[in-house]
Image (cartoon, helix red, strand yellow):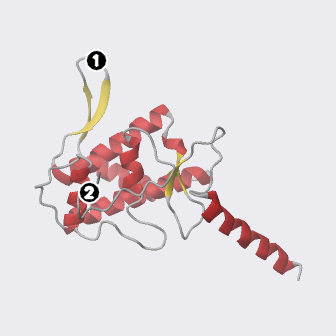
Amino acid sequence: MDKPGTVADRLGDKPADGKLRIVHAFMNTRNGDGREDLPNPDALRDWLARHELISARARLNNADLEQARSVRDALVRLSAARQSGRQDIDAIETLNRAARRAQMAVTFDADGRGQVRPLAPASDGALGSIIAIVFEAMNDGTWDRLKICRDASCAFAFYDRSKNHSGTWCDIAVCGNVAKARSFRARHAKHG
């Protein structure tokens, strides 16, 4: 249940599983229409605290907010680039910078299993935790299922549960039908 005054996670009807759900929610803190769920450092702190990535008493500033937004936007661009079969070097470099700031390190648990974890405190560490989840998802193949809606005015992240990984819209009844209608009108406009 969401705490009063917090923004509910925007996952739609296709949420990612496990820890990847945090990344999914983070990517959807902004949409293609310009909605911004992280308008200030306090909203960022509240969002990160609700996902147990930072203390609710942490003090964040505008630089932390700018960094978090740049990581979020880089994750969205990285996902969209992967879907289209291209690279986004700027997104990759943004994530690499954030990983360095988070002081990412490989640690081993009592069973000898390795994990990538941030050593930095506060927002750098929280963003490092998000990056670590992405790293794990890339290794287990679930990252490929976290996609961006093909409708540019939507740009909603969704988890593709189709058997053949062919999902392209967050909601076929809304974004898919809009795209199909747009394509139909364009085809018929050419033929007068």
The tag on residue 47 is 2
In the rendered image, the vertical position of residue 177 relative to residue 143, given as above or below: below
Image quarter where the C terminus lies is bottom right
Which residue is painted at 37% across and 61% down in the image? 29
Side (left or right) of 117 relative to 172: left
**As drawn, which residue projects farthest toward the top?**
111
Residue pushed farthest right? 191
Q: Which residue is mark 1?
A: 112
- Seen at 40% across and 42% down, the residue is 20
Above-or-below relation of 111 to 86: above
Secondary structure of the residue carrying numbered label 2: helix
Q: CA distance from mark 1 to mark 2?
A: 32 Å
Residue 8 point in image, percent of width and height: 34, 59
Residue 89 visible in image: no
Give how far across and how far down residue 16 sits, in percent.
46, 44
132 and 24: which one is in front? 24
Residue 117 visible in the picture: yes
**Callout 2, which amino acid?**
Trp
Do tag 1 and tag 2 residues touch (Cβ < 8 Å)?
A: no
Q: Percent x, y for residue 54?
A: 19, 49
Looking at this view, is 106 or 80 the one in front?
80
Residue 87 lies, with reference to residue 184, above or below; the image says above
